[in-house]
Amino acid sequence: MVVLDNLITGSAANLEGLPVDFRRHDVSRPVKVEGEVGAVLHLASPASPVDFPAYPIQIVKVGTLGTHNMLGLALAKGARFLLASTSEVYGDPLVHPQPEVYWGNVNPIGPRGCYDEAKRCAEAFTMAYHRAHGLDTRIVRIFNTYGPRMRLDDGRVLPNFMTQALRGEPMTVYGDGGQTRSLTYVDDLVRGILAVLDFDDSLPFNLGSQDEVTMLELAELVRRLTGSSSEIELRPLPVDDPRQRRPDTARAEQLLGWRPQVTLADGLGRTLEYFRRAL
Ligand code: UDP
């Protein structure tokens, strides 16, 4: 297996011990891979909201030019193509929970626009290659996913709460903490991605859990789990922060028989072990 990553937010250490041919490369630039290729999985992009102001141009490029390059590679090789899309295509959703047929409520020019619109364009690119070239394509819309090997300074909610609780620092809850997310453990997500790859259907599949919690509830959960005495500190809500998010996963359940198996308590426990070791 060939892995391409320019490592602007990733870490080569996460590949240690895996039988992969790693090449440091930015897929927003032309991609050459020799030999046969059975499947191209386009997973590349910074995805934490703290990355959006840091790498806005790279994010737009990898979702657009990067997607074009990876689609071109799949077409040239006669390979199947899978796009990692996101629940961000729904923006700050006005429909709850979000089914795949919902078109979303996205601000194209706000701070999240670089990511949301690049992923929406990536979906459009993928469907265009499917329709124009008959390319065998898949799209997964990934909801908030967590687990071991996240960056300690990733900036997303789980790494923040875990590192803050373990260090006894204040836990930073944005806004009033009433906004919700549905957290999916990484192993469940990977199983879902592989199931979509194996199933002949080019329309998007939501992949995410039904474990919808408010950020205040999540902070309390992490605090209890870690036995921390950290205080909870309210901070300003970031611009365009979605108010609620939970996937309608009927499609994945009915067609793939996929549903998450790892409970939030179990997944948080496994993730905590990692953060304890890493800190
Ligand atoms: N959040 C928070 N404290 C933090 C980091 C994030 O309360 O230290 C909130 C954030 O405002 C959002 C939710 O947690 O409502 C999830 O944020 P994250 O950055 O993990 O990803 P998002 O789902 O917004 O892309």
Image (cartoon, rainbow, N blue to C red):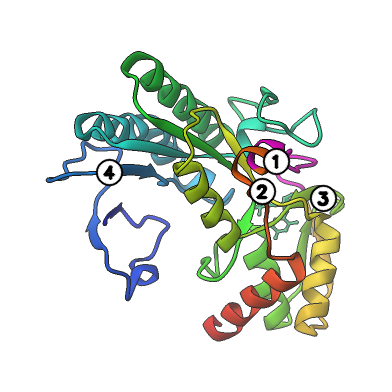
Neighbour class for label 3 at 10 Å: few (<14), some, many (≥20)? some
First of labels 2, 4 by sequence position: 4
Which residue corresponds to the image point at 71% horizontal and 31% vertical from the top-left?
99
Q: Which amino acid does label 3 sit on?
A: Gly
First of labels 3, 1 by sequence position: 3
Q: Dots 1 and 2: beta carbons under 8 Å?
A: yes
Residue 43 location, x and y as percent?
Answer: 42, 46
How far is mark 3 from mark 2, CA to CA?
Answer: 24 Å
| Of residues 258 and 273, the one drawn nearer to the viewer in this rendering | 258
Neighbour class for label 4 at 10 Å: few (<14), some, many (≥20)? few
Q: Is mark 1 on a helix, strand or loop?
A: loop
Q: Is 145 situated left or right of 25 in this image?
A: right
In the rendered image, which residue does mark 1 sit on? 249
Q: Is 89 situated left or right of 166 in this image?
A: left
Q: Dots 4 and 3: beta carbons under 8 Å?
A: no
Judged from this view, the residue extending furthest toward the left is 34
| Of residues 100 and 134, the one drawn nearer to the viewer in this rendering | 134
Q: Give the range drawn in magenta.
A: 237-252
Query: Is label 3's Cβ within 8 Å of ligand 1?
Result: yes
- Closer to the observer: label 3 or label 1? 1
Residue 258 location, x and y as percent?
Answer: 63, 49
In the rendered image, which residue does mark 2 sit on? 208
**Is the C terminus in the top left, top right, bottom left or bottom right quadrant?**
bottom right
First of labels 3, 2 by sequence position: 3
How far is mark 1 from mark 2, CA to CA?
Answer: 7 Å
How far is mark 4 from mark 1, CA to CA?
Answer: 28 Å
In the rendered image, which residue does mark 3 sit on? 175
Judge whether residue 266 can be spotted in this image.
Answer: yes
Q: What element carries label 4?
A: loop
Which residue corresponds to the image point at 40% horizontal and 46% vertical from the top-left?
44
How far is mark 4 from mark 3, CA to CA?
Answer: 46 Å
Judge whether residue 155 can be spotted in this image.
Answer: no
